[in-house]
């Protein structure tokens, strides 16, 4: 899903660009791309700037899979937070933001 998210966020990309966006090495990115191509979620196109290279594009099926996954994630988060009061939600959001800030420094 990180691959699909990266393509959705950054647009058509090379395998090496996707590797950097997803945080994996190029061989791993190539395997992820191949699986996504086989699943019909990504397609290869000729790079308009360099015909020797290909770029990867999110397909309609890939976008649908991404939307479905994000919907499931949203539903799971909503269910987990259902028992929180408004004050607890605000405190949780504050602590989570503090955690993310600390994580990015680490």
Image: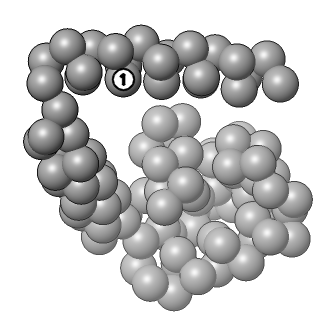
Q: Nearer the viewer, residue 18 or 96?
A: 96
Q: Nearer the viewer, residue 9 or 81?
A: 81
Q: Which of 78 and 74 is in front in this view?
A: 78
In this figure, what is the number of numbered marks?
1
Q: Is residue 36 left or right of residue 58?
A: right
10 Å crowding of disc 1: few (<14), some (14-19), many (20+): some
Q: In this view, does 49 lie to the left or right of 72?
A: right
Residue 14: image location, x then y, percent: 71, 52
Is 26 drawn above or below residue 102 in the view shown?
Answer: below
At horizontal 68% and vertical 49% (from top left) the residue drawn is 22
| Residue farthest toward the bottom in the current orientation of the protein | 38
Residue 50 visible: no
Residue 1 visible: yes
Q: In which quarter of the image is the C terminus?
A: top right
Which colour style is shown? one colour
Is 44 drawn above or below residue 24 in the view shown?
Answer: below
Q: Quadrant of residue 34?
A: bottom right
Q: What element carries label 1?
A: helix
Q: Quadrant of residue 62?
A: bottom left
Residue 63: image location, x then y, percent: 31, 58
At horizontal 12% and vertical 42% (from top left) the residue drawn is 82
Is 30 drawn above or below residue 100 in the view shown?
Answer: below
At horizontal 16% and vertical 51% (from top left) the residue drawn is 79
Residue to which mark 1 is pinned: 92
Q: In this view, does 99 lie to the left or right of 75?
A: right
Residue 97: image location, x then y, percent: 49, 17
Residue 68: image location, x then y, percent: 23, 62
At horizontal 42% and vertical 12% (from top left) the residue drawn is 94
């Amino acid at each position: 899903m990180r691959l699909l998210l990266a393509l959705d966020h950054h647009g058509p990309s090379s395998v090496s660009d996707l590797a950097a966006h997803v945080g994996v090495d190029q061989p791993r990115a190539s395997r992820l791309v191949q699986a996504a191509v086989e699943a019909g979620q990504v397609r290869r196109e000729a790079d308009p700037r360099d015909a020797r290279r290909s770029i990867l594009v999110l397909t309609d099926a890939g976008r649908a899979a991404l939307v479905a996954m994000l919907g499931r994630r949203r539903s799971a988060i909503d269910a987990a937070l259902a028992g929180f009061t408004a004050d607890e939600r605000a405190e949780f959001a504050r602590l989570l933001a503090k955690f993310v800030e600390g994580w990015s420094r680490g």
